[in-house]
Image (spheres, grey):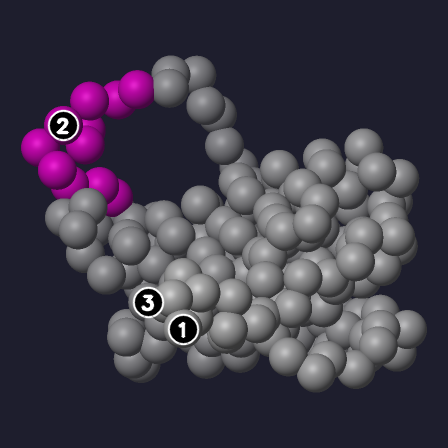
Amino acid sequence: MEEFNQPRLAINRVYTRGGDNGQTSLVGGQRLPKSDPRIEAYGTIDELNAFIGLARDSANLHGLGELSGILLRVQHELFNAGSILATLPEDAHPKQPRITGAEADQLEREIDAMNQSLPPLRSFVLPGGCRVNAELHVCRTVCRRAERICVALGDKADPAIVKYLNRLSDAFFVWSRWASQELGIEETLWEPNKAASRALL
């Protein structure tokens, strides 16, 4: 398989003042309002990437090197997704970084491998128990939001990105459970009768 082009960037100035009027540029130079759904899509993917950085650091601190390595790869993949979302189809280069079916397939293999060691669930689980678990759940929910925004874009969004985000949110759920198990942290299951209203009965 041919490699994607390496980025050709020269970031000498952090600010350009070009966005002071509430607009930003796509890869092809087109100007769009920063409130445009396309900008919202890759902005949310950028937000997700930042939260993954937190989760990756937490995984490293807890000795979860396997998970940390996977999360680092995912961060690169999300930048590739953002690259395509920031480019109109007519401006995309054949060797521009992008998401393909291979990325979703790899996530499925990793989900299946880690899920094998996990006990079956008898209820929904609550985020938390340890920091890395909670951070992975934050990643899961931001990923779902990114997916919803991409779905709302309709045919303006690459279907491979929507599929990837759908699979990635499932992966975050499994990784959160796997991390807790590796660290010996008991999962907190949802118990509807622990609500304040039940205590009044």
Label 3 is placed on what type of residue? Ile
Secondary structure of the residue carrying tag 2 is loop
Viewport quadrant of the C terminus: bottom left
What residue is pinned by disc 1? 201
Q: Nearer the viewer, residue 152 or 82?
A: 152
Please tell me which of labels 3 and 2 falls first in the chain.
2
- Marks 2/1: CA–CA distance: 56 Å
Residue 79, percent from left and from top: 54, 50
- Marks 1/3: CA–CA distance: 42 Å
In the image, taking residue 29 as reference, residue 83 lies left or right, namely right
Residue 73, percent from left and from top: 72, 52
In front: label 2 or label 1: 1
Report the residue at 50% width, 32% height from top.
Answer: 9
Instruction: Say whether residue 146 is visible.
Output: no
Magenta segment, which residues? 15-25
Report the residue at 90% width, 73% height from top.
Answer: 117
Label 1: few (<14), some (14–19) or many (≥20) C-alpha neighbours in 10 Å? few
In the image, is residue 193 above or below residue 77? below
In the image, is residue 49 above or below residue 200? above
Q: Which mark is residue 19?
A: none
Q: Which mark is residue 20?
A: 2
In front: label 3 or label 2: 3
